[in-house]
Image (cartoon, rainbow, N blue to C red):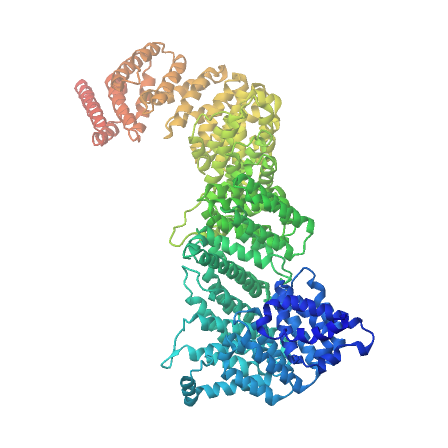
């Protein structure tokens, strides 16, 4: 046949194979042939040659335009799966536009080429491709604008429905195309009838739920009111008894409540947005709720229906409704009043999910529904959002490890499904939290939501921490929705430590969260890239590498943390040190130290709050040595930038310092870069605190701080002299001082309930500090051990012995360290004229000891000190006078030439001290000073003062104080050597008056005094002219054998009776005064001496005795409580009576 005749025969015949289902397999070839023929047809220019007439009038029964459109449109959907027949069907549609309807020629020329363009080797996602095809269908029907044409197309879709498998892509698209066709049909009655028929005969659709959902949903695009009305009528009819009977009778499978719930969701999703909002709650949400609640009732009681189909349908429907509402333009003015109710039902579904398995997608779908609901108004209160988030988090985080969950699957397909559900659920949870967090523009509330994660970040289960950080990563990564005032500091402290956690995945997720926090601040991309590069290294298992990476990340991040947020970051990090595992707590420390090192200089305003946070956590962190070291390093870092402020803050802590504060001081002292500055700062504060010679609580705190600093072995050669002076002044100011009241009150506030407050002794604290300084000085060779040992510090801290302690302390100075000693002297010199009487005593006592050092007289300005001390010797304060007189006496040891040069001044001052009868210490010191001074002078030097000195010295022979008696006897011995011709007779008479004292005190209770008496008596014997007494002394006096005193008295009196009866009488007259002595030895000696005197007295002198006086005195001694005194008195009485009888007989 000719070529033209072949075309006339093939053209109509080939079209008849397009619609019948039995030819589906050859459609790709058929479409290709038809496309070639049609392209050839388009090339014909002569209308007479066209085959259009053949098509319309040939003997072959051709398919209708509606049949061709329905068939080709459904087949076109296969293009999304890359099947050739799908793309060929689209191309054929373009060529058949004139056959299907003339109005489509121009429209399809415009639309279909654009549709075919991306199909060159690629395929669309099914959903997108379907929407594109449905849009062409929709545009085509509007262009045709023929009610009957649309009705016929509807019938064709219904007619062809049975030709496809229920699960096939073509069948699912056909439902949507049918719904779209109905939505474009202008015949309301026809649409209503068709919808009712579809609902009543849903089983004919194949998959009745998906079919009805698609058809009614897409129909609602233009006929929302009709669809809702039909649904309402259908629900009402289904409730009637007759309808249920018909369904059973005819064996029809009616739509269930679950199906209807699904239909409502799709209807809302596909409906016109402008029409949806006014009716969504009344006509969609409420019916869905009613359908769901009625499905959950048994005998009128609401229970949770565990039908997974119901739950899935409900959550999907709610999700679609929310999406539909969210997409409306008028959303800003819409409030979903049933929001809380819907959330409640969905949360119930989540709560009922088992926490030991993940077999159903309920969690996943419920989380999606909650997220969609959360985007709608009204905004829920913070507590409600927190409750929602907590329930959602629990549902996934508390699941067992993923490996264990997967093992629950029986087949490989089950295991893959569980893993799929886990991934999707985690993704949904991350998006839900992201929505809840960023929908709230209150930064404090956002922070509260992140705080919910804290409990799981502390979990001992690695997978729980991993899940939490994975969620955080999703919330923070690439997020531009955060509130402007959101504080990243506390969040950084929450997540950053986990960059060193035990699992690589945890470390990576944590790094993602940290990077996300910086992204929120819109920081530079190059810094973000550096962090990403560091993040890669966190896969290393070496903990040191991880800490190094954490440190470098902290250096980068620290630049972008606002100063006012660093305190919150530190608070979070310190809390992490207390509660996190070992690896994370180390990371906390590294982050803290690094950030303080990088940004510490700018934290002046926040410093007090930062320090308070650190102090608050120290008691617990002390339990972990490593963490406590990080805290100490943190304080040290701050001190490197703000030493003055840190020192001031530490000094305000209650006294005595607790062990944590002590540890901080020691940590500061260990930093070699801080050593000189720290000690200098403390010394300056100590000096300022003592300006008014009064020690406040802060000044005492400074001393305690110095103790801790110096105890660390800090070198102090340069500061020793000043520090010695300041601490000695502080001790002087705090003698007998109680802790200032404000400090005590503050201390009570921090004491645990029920714990008793311990009284603090400021002087003892100050003394301990000076002791520590001295110990360090001894180690450095700046001082020497005290001759009093530890007793020095007891003397120094007691008000009654402080001056003695100062003297001992002064003796511990190393004189050959001239620079140090002179430096101390220069500092101490103002103390001599201080307004504080106590400090004047301290200074005078200090210099009184130094006055005996010849080397210091040569190098130091002690001449000026001499005159100041001389003035102090006239002070009304007895202790001050005592120390001043001691210093004057020590001049004799340090500078003998000064004694000779200033003998008059010295003698007058010291002699005046002998007249201070109320304080024996002054007298004793004056006697000692006189002894030292007189040793350097001649009889001519002291001639003017000799008589006065002798008379005053004699008055102290019977003093109750041993030191006074001892010194007096020693001085009297020296006076014997200074007796010139002028005073020899006077001194001899004074010796006679003193003989009774010498003789009785040879056996003084204090052996040293007995020895001194013997030496003094030996020196005085030449003045008496009785040389035999020397031999007598050597023969009888032995302090170790007291009984020999009776023999000595007897022999002495015998010699005196022969040589000097007047002296014997003098002894007798002076003996009565000793019968009342407080020492029993003296009373006994006086009785024995009386016995010897009476026994050796000549009759002439015996007659001169006052017998009554002697008798009464001896009788009194016979009643003495001491037995030895009684015996001596009895013997004397017998001698007395015997001699009296002798006198009487002689008469």
Residue 1031: x %, y % from top left: 33, 9
Q: Position of residue 269 (x, y in %)?
A: 59, 75
From the viewer's side, name the closer residue of 412 and 714: 412
Pick the front one: 172 or 967: 172
Vertical placement of 199 versus 342: above or below?
A: below
Residue at the image position 69 percent from the left and 76 percent from the top:
12
Quadrant of the rendered image containing residue 83:
bottom right
Q: Residue at x 61, y 21 (%)?
A: 858
Total numbered labels placed on residues in the image: 0
Q: Position of residue 23 (x, y in %)?
A: 59, 71
Q: Does the image show residue 657?
A: no
Q: Would residue 462 be visible to someone looking at this image?
A: yes
998 versus 394 height, above or below: above
Q: Quadrant of the N terminus?
A: bottom right
Of the pair 97 and 444, the residue shown nearer to us: 97
- Residue 1078 percent location from the top left of the image: 30, 31
Quadrant where the C terminus sits is top left
Q: Residue furthest front?
A: 1
Q: Is residue 146 left or right of residue 405?
A: right
Extreme residue in the right direction: 46
Question: In this view of the protein, which residue sits in the foreground, 436 or 181?
Answer: 181
């Amino acid at each position: 046949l000719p070529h033209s005749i072949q075309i006339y025969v093939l053209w109509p015949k080939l079209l008849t194979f397009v619609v019948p289902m039995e030819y589906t397999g050859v459609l790709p070839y058929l479409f290709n042939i038809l496309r070639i023929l049609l392209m050839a047809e388009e090339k014909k220019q002569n209308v007479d040659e066209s085959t259009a007439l053949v098509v319309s009038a040939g003997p072959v029964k051709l398919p209708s335009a509606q049949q061709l459109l329905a068939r080709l449109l459904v087949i076109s959907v296969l293009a999304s799966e890359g099947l050739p027949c799908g793309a060929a069907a689209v191309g054929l549609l373009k060529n058949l536009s004139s056959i299907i309807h003339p109005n489509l020629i121009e429209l399809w020329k415009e639309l279909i080429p654009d549709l075919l363009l991306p199909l060159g080797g690629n395929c669309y996602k099914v959903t997108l491709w379907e929407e594109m095809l449905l849009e062409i269908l929709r545009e085509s029907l509007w262009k045709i604008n023929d009610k009957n044409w649309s009705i016929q197309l509807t019938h064709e879709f219904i007619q062809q429905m049975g030709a496809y498998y229920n699960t096939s892509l073509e069948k699912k698209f056909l439902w949507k195309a049918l719904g779209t066709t109905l939505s474009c049909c202008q015949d309301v009655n026809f649409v209503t009838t068709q919808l009712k028929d579809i609902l009543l005969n849903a089983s004919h659709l194949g998959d009745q739920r998906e079919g009805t959902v698609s058809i009614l949903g897409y129909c609602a695009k233009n006929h929302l009111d009709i669809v809702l009305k039909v649904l309402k009528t259908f629900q009402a009819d289904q409730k009637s008894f007759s309808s249920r009977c018909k369904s059973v009778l005819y064996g029809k499978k009616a739509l269930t409540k679950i199906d209807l719930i699904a239909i409502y969701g799709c209807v809302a999703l596909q409906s016109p947005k402008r029409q949806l909002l006014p009716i969504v709650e009344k006509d969609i949400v409420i019916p869905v709720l009613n359908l769901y609640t009625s499905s959950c009732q048994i005998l009128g009681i609401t229970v949770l229906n565990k039908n997974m189909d119901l739950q899935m349908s409900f959550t999907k429907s709610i999700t679609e409704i929310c999406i539909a509402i969210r997409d409306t333009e008028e959303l800003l003015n819409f409030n979903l009043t049933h929001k809380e109710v819907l959330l409640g039902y969905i949360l119930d579904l989540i709560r009922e999910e088992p926490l030991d398995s993940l077999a159903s997608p309920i969690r996943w779908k419920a989380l999606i529904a909650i997220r969609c609901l959360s985007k709608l108004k009204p905004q829920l209160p913070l507590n409600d959002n927190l409750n929602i988030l907590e329930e959602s988090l629990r549902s996934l985080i508390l699941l067992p490890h993923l490996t264990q969950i997967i093992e629950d699957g029986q087949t490989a397909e089950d295991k893959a499904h569980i893993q799929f559900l886990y991934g999707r659920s985690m993704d949904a949870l991350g998006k839900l939290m992201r929505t809840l967090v960023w929908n709230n523009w209150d930064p404090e509330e956002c922070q509260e939501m992140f705080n919910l994660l804290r409990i799981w970040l502390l979990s001992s289960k690695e997978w729980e921490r991993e899940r939490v950080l994975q969620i955080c990563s999703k919330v923070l990564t690439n997020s531009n929705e955060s509130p402007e005032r959101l504080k990243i500091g506390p969040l950084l402290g929450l997540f950053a430590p986990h960059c060193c956690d035990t699992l690589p995945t945890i470390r990576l997720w944590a790094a993602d969260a940290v990077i996300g926090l910086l992204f929120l601040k819109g920081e530079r991309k190059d810094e973000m890239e550096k962090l990403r590069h560091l993040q890669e290294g966190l896969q290393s298992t070496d903990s040191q590498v991880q800490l190094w990476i954490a440190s470098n990340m902290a250096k980068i991040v620290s630049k972008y943390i606002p100063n006012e947020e660093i305190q919150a970051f530190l608070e979070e990090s310190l809390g992490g040190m207390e509660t996190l595992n070992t690896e994370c707590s180390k990371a906390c420390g590294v982050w803290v130290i690094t950030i303080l090192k990088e940004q510490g200089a700018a934290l002046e305003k926040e410093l007090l709050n930062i320090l308070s946070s650190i102090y608050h956590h120290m008691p617990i962190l002390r339990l972990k040595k490593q963490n406590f070291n990080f805290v100490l390093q943190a304080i040290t870092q701050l001190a490197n930038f703000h030493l003055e402020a840190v020192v001031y803050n530490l000094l305000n802590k209650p006294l005595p310092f607790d062990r944590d504060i002590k540890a901080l001081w020691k940590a500061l002292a260990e930093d070699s870069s801080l050593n000189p500055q720290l000690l200098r700062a403390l010394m300056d504060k100590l000096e300022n605190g003592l300006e008014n010679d009064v020690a406040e609580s802060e000044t005492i705190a400074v001393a305690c701080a110095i103790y801790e600093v110096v105890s660390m072995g800090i070198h102090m050669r340069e500061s020793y002299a000043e520090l010695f002076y300041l601490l000695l002044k502080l001790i002087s100011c705090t003698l007998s001082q109680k802790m200032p009241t404000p400090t005590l009150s503050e201390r009570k506030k921090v004491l645990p309930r029920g714990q008793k407050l311990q009284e603090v002794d400021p002087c003892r604290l100050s003394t301990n500090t000076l002791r520590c300084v001295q110990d360090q000085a001894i180690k450095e060779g700046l001082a020497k051990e005290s001759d009093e040992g530890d007793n020095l510090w007891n003397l120094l801290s007691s008000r009654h012995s402080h001056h003695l302690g100062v003297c001992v302390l002064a003796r511990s100075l190393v004189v050959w360290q001239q620079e140090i000693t002179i430096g101390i002297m220069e500092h101490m010199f103002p103390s001599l004229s201080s307004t504080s009487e106590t400090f004047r005593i301290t200074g005078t006592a200090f210099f009184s000891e130094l006055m005996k050092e010849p080397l210091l007289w040569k190098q130091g300005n002690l001449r000026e000190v001499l005159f100041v001390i001389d003035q102090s010797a006239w002070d009304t304060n007895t202790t001050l006078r005592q120390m001043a007189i001691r210093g004057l006496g020590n001049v004799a040891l340090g500078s003998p030439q000064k004694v000779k040069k200033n003998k008059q001044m010295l003698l007058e001052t010291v002699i005046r001290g002998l007249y201070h009868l109320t304080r024996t210490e002054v007298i004793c010191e004056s006697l000692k000073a006189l002894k030292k001074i007189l040793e350097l002078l001649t009889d001519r030097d002291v001639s003017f003062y000799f008589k006065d000195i002798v008379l005053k010295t004699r008055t102290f022979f019977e003093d109750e104080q041993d030191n006074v008696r001892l010194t007096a006897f020693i001085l009297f011995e020296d006076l014997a050597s200074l007796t010139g011709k002028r005073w020899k007779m006077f001194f001899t008479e004074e010796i006679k008056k003193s003989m009774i004292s010498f003789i009785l005190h040879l056996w003084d209770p204090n052996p040293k005094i007995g020895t001194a008496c013997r030496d003094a008596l030996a020196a005085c014997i030449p003045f008496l002219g009785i040389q035999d007494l020397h031999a007598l002394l050597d023969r009888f006096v032995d302090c170790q054998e007291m009984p020999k005193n009776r023999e000595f008295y007897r022999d002495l009196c015998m010699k005196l009776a022969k040589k000097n009866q007047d002296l014997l009488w003098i002894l007798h007259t002076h003996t009565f005064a000793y019968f009342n002595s407080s020492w029993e030895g003296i009373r006994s000696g006086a009785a024995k001496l009386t016995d010897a005197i009476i026994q050796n007295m000549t009759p002439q002198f015996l007659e001169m005795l006052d017998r009554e006086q002697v008798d009464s005195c001896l009788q009194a001694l016979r009643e003495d409580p001491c037995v030895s005194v009684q015996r001596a008195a009895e013997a004397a009485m017998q001698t007395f009576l015997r001699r009296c009888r002798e006198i009487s007989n002689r008469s």
